[in-house]
Amino acid sequence: KAGVTQTPRYLIKTRGQQVTLSCSPISGHRSVSWYQQTPGQGLQFLFEYFSETQRNKGNFPGRFSGRQFSNSRSEMNVSTLELGDSALYLCASSLGGVGTEAFFGQGTRLTVV
Amino acid sequence: AQKVTQAQTEISVVEKEDVTLDCVYETRDTTYYLFWYKQPPSGELVFLIRRNSFDEQNEISGRYSWNFQKSTSSFNFTITASQVVDSAVYFCALNGGATNKLIFGTGTLLAVQP
């Protein structure tokens, strides 16, 4: 069974640009969550999508957005990039029920210069 | 408010030593779930275990064991006879209430020296 796939693995962007990250969940999983990991703030929840609907949202500015497609694949978009957006972005896939195991991808390392 | 505290920032042991990673959580929910994840240098968070708040039975899986105590709000993780391959950052996480959101601790960096 294939795991969670995130693309691309590495990205370098310039301040002010926008970026789109992709996540393909485990087959059969309907929930996709996104997390940001930085040395200063640790792992923080961005948002969760379930059946193409945003179900939960963390405390991030509106520059961070996402969507989920009918095949459960999800994309995350960050507009008007800031230096502080440099982080490892991790995607988690689960069946969707509260408390079910979440399986993570290898992440996308975003560097904003 | 929900919170997870991993007071140990870094632990260094010599191979074959036993090591315990501490995790203390706070929640007002009566139903909640606790997790441990391992993050090797590659970056991926590897799922290790899930526990729900109604199951205080300790669990052992090979060299790994977990001790869940609701009375002290702790969910500690012990590695017996540690190996170099156990070197990683270990995260404890809490999921409570009606959402699927995970609240992570700050992680413990475990270095196992040969």
Image (tube, coloured by chain):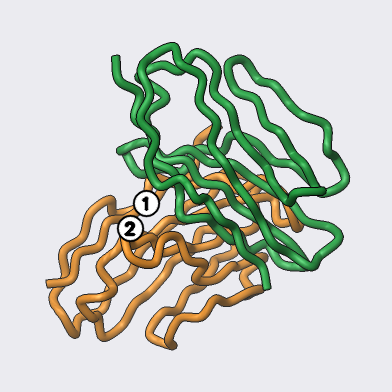
Chain colours: A orange, B green
Which residue is at 49% across, 63% downward? A34
Specify the subunit that label 2 lies on: A
Q: How many marks?
A: 2
Q: Position of residue A32 (x, y in %)?
A: 57, 59
Is disc 2 surrounded by few (<14), some (14 to 19) or many (20+) residues within 10 Å?
many
Is any atom of residue A71 visible in this view?
A: no
Quadrant of residue B22 within the rendered picture: top right
For the residue pair A37 and B76, the one nearer the viewer reads as: B76
Residue contact at pointers 2 and 1, CB within 8 angstroms: yes
Given the image, on which type of amino acid does mark 1 rest? Gly
N-terminal of the pair, mark 2 or mark 1, is: 2
SS category of the residue bearing label 2: strand
Quadrant of residue B82 within the rendered picture: top left
For the residue pair B72 and B41, the one nearer the viewer reads as: B72
Which residue is at 27% across, 56% downward? A109
Which residue is at 34% across, 77% downward? A78
Is any atom of residue B68 visible in this view?
A: yes
Q: Which of the two marks, 2 or 1, is nearer to us in this view?
A: 2
Q: Position of residue A1 (x, y in %)?
A: 56, 31
Q: Position of residue B95 (x, y in %)?
A: 69, 58
Q: Which of the image's four quarters has the N terminus of chain B?
A: bottom right
- Report the Cα–Cα distance between label 2 and label 1: 6 Å
SS category of the residue bearing label 1: loop
Residue at the disc numbered 1: A107
Q: Which of the image's four quarters has the C terminus of chain B?
A: top left
Given the image, on which type of amino acid does mark 2 rest? Leu
Residue at the disc numbered 2: A88
Q: Position of residue B85 (x, y in %)?
A: 38, 21
Which residue is at 21% across, 60% downward? A11
Q: Is residue A109 left or right of residue B52?
A: left
Is label 2 on the same chain as label 1? yes
Looking at the image, is B102 positioned above or below residue A26? below
